[in-house]
Amino acid sequence: MKKRKIIVAITGASGAIYAKLLIEKLKNNQHEIQSLALVFSTNAKEVWIYELNEQIPTSGNITIYKSTDFNAPFASGSAQYDTMIVCPCSMGTLARIASGISNDLITRAADVILKERRKLILVTRETPLNIIHINNMKTLTEAGGIICPAVPSFYSKPQTINQLAETVVDRILDLANLEITTFRWQTD
């Protein structure tokens, strides 16, 4: 099996718990992953510290890139990163990606993933939605992106906040075609 090259971008939307759990689960799936790149927006770092009361992760088999580093390998399609997950994805980031504005490494990488027809998963965090948000989601869906709102499920009967957030993270990992063990509705 070919190992995957994955980018995780974290923006300033609330929901750092989703990104934290996603990173942890990706680190546990190293047998499927050749390269795991991580990019934080400036606001994402502040939200991470505020919501989780901890510093951003620096250990493990991940490489962290600055949001201004256009020399990162995945700023070009030739590096062949196959999946990008923006988690959580702010509506501002979503709008810039939908408009083709590549003003930082996150939006440039998303543009590259779309132009190369690879997998872009946007874990949106906003409610309620206005028509601009909805139109931007439509534009990105038509361009090949996957909109995966951070909407937890309850049928697995989660008992903790982490278990509830994991219902979203497991869905993201399913969309990224990674092998995971998770609750499946009406299966043995």
Image: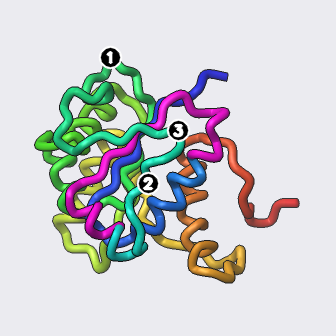
Q: From the viewer's perspective, is 99 left or right of 62?
A: left
Quadrant showing the N terminus: top right
* Residue 72 placement: quadrant: top left
Using the image as rendered, state which of residue 10 and residue 52 is in the foreground: 52
Q: Which residue is mark 2?
A: 57
Q: Secondary structure at mark 2?
A: loop
Q: Amino acid at mark 3?
A: Asn
Q: Amino acid at mark 2?
A: Pro
Q: Which residue is mark 3?
A: 61
List x then y, in percent, for residue 152: 54, 73
| Above/below status of 176 relative to 12 | above
Residue at 72% across, 59% down:
182
Q: Amino acid at mark 1?
A: Ser
Residue at 44% across, 30% down:
82
Q: Is residue 53 magenta?
A: no
CA separation in Å, label 1 and label 2:
27 Å
Q: From the viewer's perspective, is 141 left or right of 165?
A: left
Q: Earlier in the sequence, mark 1 or mark 2?
A: 2
Residue at 64% across, 46% down:
28
Q: Are marks 1 and 2 in contact (CB under 8 Å)?
A: no
CA separation in Å, label 3 and label 1:
22 Å
Residue at 20% across, 73% down:
130
Q: From the viewer's perspective, is 42 left or right of 24?
A: left
Q: Which residue is mark 1?
A: 78
Closest to the camera, between mark 3 and mark 1, is 3
Quadrant showing the C terminus: bottom right
List x then y, in percent, for residue 160: 63, 81
- Give the extent of the magenta segment: 27-48
Q: Is residue 42 magenta?
A: yes
Q: Residues within 10 Å of mark 1 (few under 14, many from 20)?
A: few
Q: Which labelled disc corresponds to residue 135? A: none
